[in-house]
Image: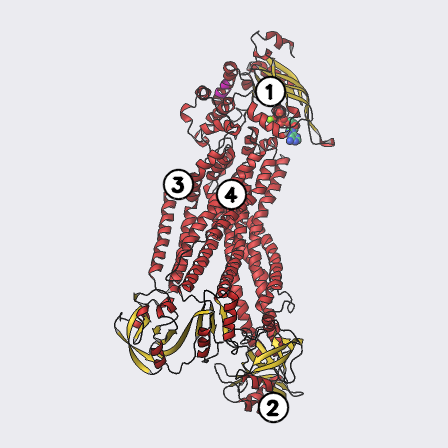
Amino acid sequence: MLRTTLAGLRMHKGRLVTTALAIALGVMFVSGTLVFSDTLRESFSSQVMGSAERMDAVVLPAQGSEDPVSGDVLDEVRELPEIDRAAGVTMGDAPLLDKDGRAVGSVPTAGVSVGEPTRFSADEGELPDRPGEAALATSTAEATGYEVGDSATVLGPDEQKHEFTVTGLIDFGTEPSLAYRGAVAFTSPVAAEMTGAEGYSEIDALAAEGVSAQQAADAVSAVAGDGTEVLTGQELGDRLAEQAGAQADALATGLLLFALVSVVVAAIVISNTFAILVAQRQREMALLRCVGAVRRQVFTAVVTEALVVGLLASALGVLAGVGLGYAGFAVGAEAFDADAGSADVVVKAQTVLIGLAVGTVTTLIAAVLPARRATLVPPLAALRTSATATALDTRVGILRMATGTVLLLASAGVVALARQTDDPETGLYLVVGAGFVAFAGVIVLSPLLVRAAVAAVSPLMRALGVSTALAADNARRNPRRAATAMIALTVGATLITGYSVVNASMMATTTDMLDRQFPMDYQVRAQFAEEGPGVPPEVARDLRESPEVAEVVAQRSATAETGDGFVRYTTFRGVPPEEAAGGGTDAGDLADVGPGRVAVVSDVAGERGVGDTLALTTGEGERDYEIAALVEGAQSSWSVLMDPEDFSSAFPEVRGDEMLMVSGAESAGDEELRDAVYAAVEDRPTLQVDSMAQMRRQYEDVLNTAFLAVVAMLGLAVVIAVFGIANTLALSVLERTRESAMLRAMGLKRAQLRVMLMWEAVLMCLVGALVGIGLGVFFGWAASAAVLDDLLFRVPTAQIAAFLAAAVAAGLLASVLPSRRAARTSITAAMASE
Amino acid sequence: MSQSAAKAAPASDPTHAPPVVTSRDLVKVYGRADSAVHALDGVTVDFARGAFTAIMGPSGSGKSTLMHCLAGLDTVTSGTVHLGRTEITRLRDKQLTLLRRDRIGFIFQSFNLLPMLTAEQNILLPGRIAKRRHDPARFKRIVEVVGLGDRLGHLPSALSGGQQQRVAVARALLGDPEVVYADEPTGNLDSRSGAEVLGFLRDSARDLGQTVIMVTHDPVAAAYADRVVFLRDGRLVDEVHQPTAETVLDRLVKLES
Ligand SMILES: Nc1ncnc2c1ncn2[C@@H]1O[C@H](COP(=O)(O)OP(=O)(O)O)[C@@H](O)[C@H]1O
Ligand SMILES: [Mg+2]
């Protein structure tokens, strides 16, 4: 008896360990996210505070104002007795050339002045203090490979080249406007000269001896005048920190969504575990009732157990979360322009409390239903003989079937409705809603699904041998338990599959869109500068003359404002419009676009059709055109496609090309074409040349990286689900100890027993994964179809096959411990135990 | 051996056939040193082919342990057990498993059947485990004898306790094992169902020549056997041939005193 009790205790510990792990993992994700984002926010804010607090008073253009602070203000500020020193920050475009002599980035790098005083300091080397010297933003230096001591070329206002010696690197951190475009810092006069900018984006001032920051700011405020805003350094720091914090908040929100998925899955796992434990302890509960325990006491006993387990596991989870958050920050800080070394790990009391609360409350909620069921055990159950085999739970449940079917039909209905909706956002919300409804339906139907799935594979498994046959029979004996274990996995499977379908469909659709366009190898654009001149027409001319180039399509565009918004006019020169624009039409033919005849998107056409006359607002006033073709709005980058001659007369001020599309000659090799294209732009370093092959690769890389990140986040939910399956199996093994002993006595080998349990787990995982894959494919399609009208639906079979393989592997893993325990138990000991 | 019992035995007594199962100086010690329990303390006994033997004794006397050791379910501390010519005390776990599978049948007190298999599937299970083809004629006959004809398609939960045990008997008999071990097979049954099950065991020994070894503490159950051996404190202390409930009870009372 003692032996049995001890064995039971050991088992007891074991079965709580897996449950606790499920909770702990969910909590770890939540608190890890909080620690990570708090640390990131702290690091951001210490960075900006550090730079802002160096100043006593700062003058900024008034919020919402486009105009810089005028130079007069600086002069007046300098005159103030309260001010010791002040300097203006000049900011404008200063295109830095990379080592190949091409301008860096699609937006020109910022030129910024570091005067005396300045908020910025050099991370490496020194700030520039004479003409001919410049410092680079660390991000810019990283992108270009420049180091301190190198010589770098920056273009001046008229594109003339200026050489500078790099004296230092400045970490601008999250400084708005500089973080994205990168920056080159000069002394004040050089910055003004290089950027051609008038006025200042900011004036930084230090107070005189004995004057407080507030007094200094007040004094400055008195002279700064309208259109400006004066802050103390502290105030500026607070504002910048808030802006940077918003970034960390957005990140935290995204991560918490994934953490939520993990917590929900953990809740399912915990609920199933408690349900099984309660069922197994029926006699114990009944005995309690027999000796006089009232229902509430039984309920309290179960809930208390949940509370203890929940609290302990949550504490463990919070600890692990702190570690995870810190590790995440150490690894990921770089990616967010934060300084990994700058901040200590931030663990707020709130983080610990939230982590504990999430885990404990989730556990309690998950345990309530099973605890209620425990109170329903009649005292008589204790007296029931254990000799008779317990009846199997094989009720079909008409109500269950009906409810599930109604929910699934309702979900399909909502998806159909989403298909009818024109607004992508509404459509997406509808699809997400339908997804939840369908999931509820699947939960309701899951016991039937499990039974049906097992029935479907039963003939095969029966044919395979006695172990697999028994596995199939076992999987069916308690469908509700198996179903709950499976559902936990289905959550992850649905989300991963759904995302992979969206990912694959988007990729295919975009690739197809690119394929249907003019088959270009290179694209040439001007660096984005407001109202810039575009690509000079000579570049297209030079390229056309080059023997390596087959064709050049020059795209010109102009935007005109009409009564209800902006209309974008485009023309292609070089090849016929239908070749250049590609894609299909709703009516008419792009080939018919010619003098006086235009193609328009349906929004612009309104009620009119092909052949009708349409009045359009151009740069030269209203003009009439005949509609040659109508195009669906979402798939084209223009609203009106015109003949080149019409375009020139309608928008005579547009001289440059917006973009050149270059296709290589058959005879030209990759290298030759590349050289030819670069040769044509050699004298114009700010033009951006991109190879299409490279752009596609980058696009795919971005999508694939995002995919991996999402899968990794959802992976934890899958891991938790696998714990649940292992736990369910372990508990069934415990329950079937005597049965296993009997099988072994009858000559079932240990290996056969293990194989049986292995297949039970694999079966559960496969059903869970397959249901999830089905849901994921459907809702992945529905979601991407809601967003993209002419979606190319793709099912990423390789990814799904990999996921299925992972599910099988997970099943095998989940069965390792339970089956080892089952195979090891001595037959006679199992027979003796009750 | 008891003199009186040997004299009372008629010439046709199956207990005089050559033994199928023999044990020599069987010792089983649980625990070690100070807390050691001698569950079996030198048991030497033979079980004749085709005989129905009952093992009796007070609770804790070592009945179950003896059965487990004879059946290759447990290892022995010393001594030997033979099944036919096989010395099973020398076999490793894997070989023991195969031996049980191919040559031994079991009937337990409870939890005998797999709840998700029908009566028929339960009966055929050992054959499936051994990948053995069953003899349909034998199956039919056994099912008829135990009276399960119309209940074969039912799940155990739809059968009474007696019916469940009859399924277990049919399962043990179907493979024509060299010996069937039954551990308190009627312990959980009402007396009528118990009598039925015991009747089948006796008949199978008589009609099919099946060797049956049954552990019981019920003198009425023991009376169905051809021979009863008595254990006390892990030792064989007495035996009765052609027992009646009275003779068995008589010996038991003597043993306990
Ligand atoms: N696994 C075990 N570990 C320790 N002692 C045991 C074990 N199994 C049985 N015993 C002891 O061995 C003795 C014989 O037990 P058992 O064969 O079950 O007796 P019976 O079946 O006649 O009631 C008893 O004293 C019992 O406590
Ligand atoms: Mg016993």
Q: Kindly indicate the quadrant of the structure image that contains residue B48.
A: top right
Give the mark toward the camera: 3 or 2: 2
Q: Kindly indicate the quadrant of the structure image that contains residue A559.
A: bottom left
The CA span between labels 3 and 2 is 87 Å
Q: Amino acid at mark 1?
A: Ile
The CA span between labels 3 and 1 is 47 Å
Are discs 4 and 1 both within one chain?
A: no
- Numbered disc 2: what chain? A
- Numbered disc 4: what chain? A
**Residue B55, numbered circle:** 1
Give the mark toward the camera: 4 or 3: 4
Q: Nearer the viewer, residue A437 or A580?
A: A580
Q: Nearer the viewer, residue B228 or A679?
A: A679
Do tag 4 and tag 3 residues touch (Cβ < 8 Å)? no
**Residue A762, numbered circle:** 4
Give the mark toward the camera: 3 or 1: 3
Q: Residues within 10 Å of mark 2 (few under 14, many from 20)?
A: some
Q: Residue at 56%, 37% (x, y): give it.
A: A754
Q: Residues within 10 Å of mark 1 (few under 14, many from 20)?
A: many
The CA span between labels 4 and 1 is 44 Å
Q: Which residue is mark 3?
A: A396
The CA span between labels 4 and 3 is 24 Å
Residue B227 image point, x, y percent:
58, 15
Magenta span contains residue B198: yes
